[in-house]
Image (spheres, rainbow, N blue to C red):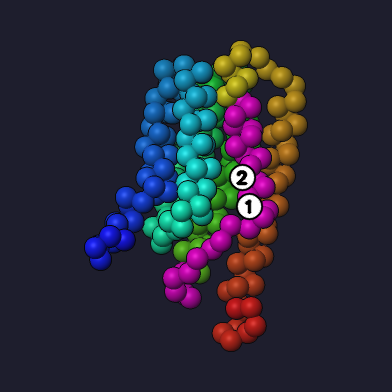
């Protein structure tokens, strides 16, 4: 803050990085459509770097904001959803395409969480849903899977361990989705004034 003037939240560095992740998503899709595997890999890697940097800068320079609480996860979901859809299409993801069931599980979990959040907010009012450890672990697994597929496509190889990674990611995603459901229901039915509410 200088001279009593407050910097608009959208201009804070962490939020600029989150917004950059959103803007890189169309570039990622374009590179995939043009069948440029190494460019697709590089853009996804760069977008992923902004995810690590926005959280770091927010903590290191105390630049956390209300906008950042929404923009950061929104940027993540837009990028990851686009990546899962693109890499599931055999014509755009050669020689390795994600199995449809994995994409359905990963995107389905996010849709379920989003709908649950809307229901919660409509009945209980505005609130913040911090990410859980299970959610963070499943996201790391999802990103690792996407990077592995992109790298394998760039190398033109189809390693057998990719299938194991698919199963691991599906399992972790399913467990995190179940954890979010249980946690959300507990919060929803917890009485006002109850310790820990």
Instruction: Give the residue drawn at x 68%, y 59%.
Output: 179
In which quadrant of the rendered image does the N terminus lie?
bottom left
Which residue was labeled with disc 1?
135
What segment carries the magenta color? 121-149
Instruction: Give the residue drawn at x 41%, y 60%.
Output: 65
Instruction: Give the residue drawn at x 24%, y 63%.
Output: 3
Residue 33, x across and y down, in percent: 43, 21
Circle 1: element type: helix
Q: Is residue 148 visible?
A: yes
Which residue was labeled with disc 2?
139
Residue furthest to the bottom in view is: 193
Left or right placement of residue 122 versus residue 158 in this view? left
- Distance between mark 1 and mark 2 Cα atoms: 6 Å
Q: Is residue 67 above or below residue 151?
A: below
Left or right placement of residue 187 versus residue 59 in this view? right
- Front-most of residues 183 and 102: 183
Circle 2: element type: helix
Residue furthest to the front in view is: 3
The reply to whether the C-beta atoms of the residues labelled 1 and 2 are less than 8 Å apart is: yes
Q: Is residue 119 visible?
A: no
Q: Is residue 155 above or below residue 54?
A: above
In which image quadrant can residue 64 be found? bottom left
Left or right placement of residue 61 versus residue 165 in this view? left
Residue 76, x across and y down, in percent: 49, 44
> How many numbered dots are placed on residues in this image?
2
Q: Is residue 126 magenta?
A: yes
Q: Is residue 44 above or below residue 158?
A: below
């Amino acid at each position: 803050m200088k001279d009593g003037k407050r910097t608009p939240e959208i201009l804070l560095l962490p939020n600029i990085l989150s917004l950059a992740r959103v803007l890189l998503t169309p570039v990622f899709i374009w590179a995939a459509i043009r069948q440029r595997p190494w460019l697709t890999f590089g853009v996804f890697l760069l977008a992923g770097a902004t995810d690590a940097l926005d959280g770091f800068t927010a903590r290191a320079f105390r630049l956390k904001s209300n906008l950042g609480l929404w923009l950061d996860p929104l940027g993540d979901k837009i990028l990851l959803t686009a990546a899962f859809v693109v890499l599931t299409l055999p014509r755009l993801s050669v020689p390795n395409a994600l199995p449809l069931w994995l994409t359905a599980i990963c995107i389905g979990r996010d849709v379920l969480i989003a709908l649950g959040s809307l229901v919660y907010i409509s009945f209980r009012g505005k609130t913040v849903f911090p990410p859980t450890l299970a959610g963070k672990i499943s996201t790391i697994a999802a990103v690792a899977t996407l990077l592995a597929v992109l790298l394998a496509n760039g190398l033109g190889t189809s390693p057998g361990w990719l299938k194991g990674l698919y199963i691991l990611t599906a399992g972790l995603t399913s467990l995190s989705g179940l954890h979010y459901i249980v946690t959300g229901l507990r919060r929803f039915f917890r009485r006002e004034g109850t310790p820990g509410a």
